[in-house]
Amino acid sequence: MRAINSLSIFVSLSLLFTACHTKPEKEKSTSTDKLDVTTVKGIRYTEVKRRFSNGLSFDTTGFQQEPSWIIQFKSADTVLAYDPAQKIMQGFHLHHDHADVFNFAKEWFRFKLISKDSLVFQRLQVTKKEIADDIRSDVNMTFYADDYIKNKLKTTAGKLQRPSKTDTVFIKEMVARANKYPDNRDSVFAGRQIATLRARDNRITVERLSSVDKLNGRTEAYDYLYPRYKLVIPDAYKDFAYEFNVIVDEKGKLQLSYFFTNLPEFKETRKKVLAGITSVYLQNLLIIKPGSTLGIPHASEITVNVTGRKPAK
């Protein structure tokens, strides 16, 4: 349950195309030999849905598929994609590999639907020219033309991008289980809004650490899936340094979760020490806000790097 695949500019997970209340104009199938974008050239599309094949935008780890792309076909071999950092539409070469598989912006896709009103792309995980036959290639992204959103659906992209009622039902079920069994790592899940720790006073310092490493495929999603904090206690009973996991329940109460030791014979002793640090120091010195998803607080797991320093005499 805790595992996650690497995330790229799209986040390498999945989603499923589901129809809106108002149907787009008649669909046109893509050619398996040559992509004809004549009828859609120059149309600006905004991604409105990104979901798993079960129709959800969340998975059991707490990872959320979030639609964010804006694209436009400039020509038969060029796609423009919006760059939020530079606030421009940036051009990418559209490479046709085989059948209905294409590459642009360093990502691989199977084009499932191209029409004036909508697009559906399946994002593919390709390694050594092989398409992965697993969840990494189970990503469907749905785009609507900006004109279609505004003038036919008479709504906004922001409203269409919101989690669905099905997502809400799923998350409520997940929350109920996590809060019923907060001592079980397999029951809790990552909060979309992470559990936050703040120093109650100068007896402890708090720093949130980042796991983002885009060169190795770790995008911003890692920071909410695997939250990490560095804590320093300047007036500890002795010098120590430990890294371990704690579960923050829906009320902000901490309990020791996972820790590693390469000395099995001292595991119980280590467990008692870390449980003591958690209940005596962390619980009392921190102001704790539990993690939440869709505004609902729930038990989640975080990693803490705790250093204690004994005052000099």
Image (tube, rainbow, N blue to C red):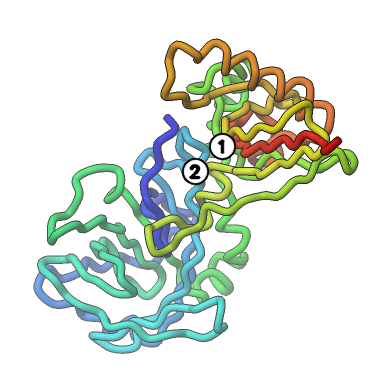
Left or right: residue 149 versus residue 289 is left
Of mark 1 and mark 2, the one earlier in the sequence is: 2
Residue that badge 1 annotates = 190
Coordinates of residue 210 in the picture (x, y in percent): 58, 54
Task: Tell me the CA gap for discs 1 and 2.
Answer: 7 Å
Residue at image point 50% right, 14% down: 266
- Which of these two is toward me, 268 or 105? 268
Which of the two residues, 181 or 25, is positioned nearer the viewer here? Answer: 181
Q: Quadrant of the N terminus?
A: top left
Decide: marks 1, 2 in contact (CB < 8 A)?
yes
Counting from the top left corner in percent of width and height, residue 127 is at: 19, 57
**Would residue 239 appear left or right of 217 to someone viewing this image?**
right
Residue nearest the observer in this picture, 55 or 154: 55
Q: Is residue 286 visible?
A: no
Mark 2, residues whose alpha carbon is within 10 Å: few (<14), some, or many (≥20)? many
Q: Find numbered disc 1 in the image and state the secondary structure of the residue it sits on.
A: loop
Is any atom of residue 129 visible in this view?
yes
Check residue 63 in the rendering and tell me which mark sits there, or answer none.
2
Residues 289 and 272: in front is 272
Which amino acid type is shown beneath numbered disc 1? Ala
Residue at position x 39%, y 58% from top?
217
The residue at the point 43 percent across, 65 percent down is 143
Q: Quadrant of residue 189?
A: top right
Look at 37% across and 75% down and name the residue there.
116
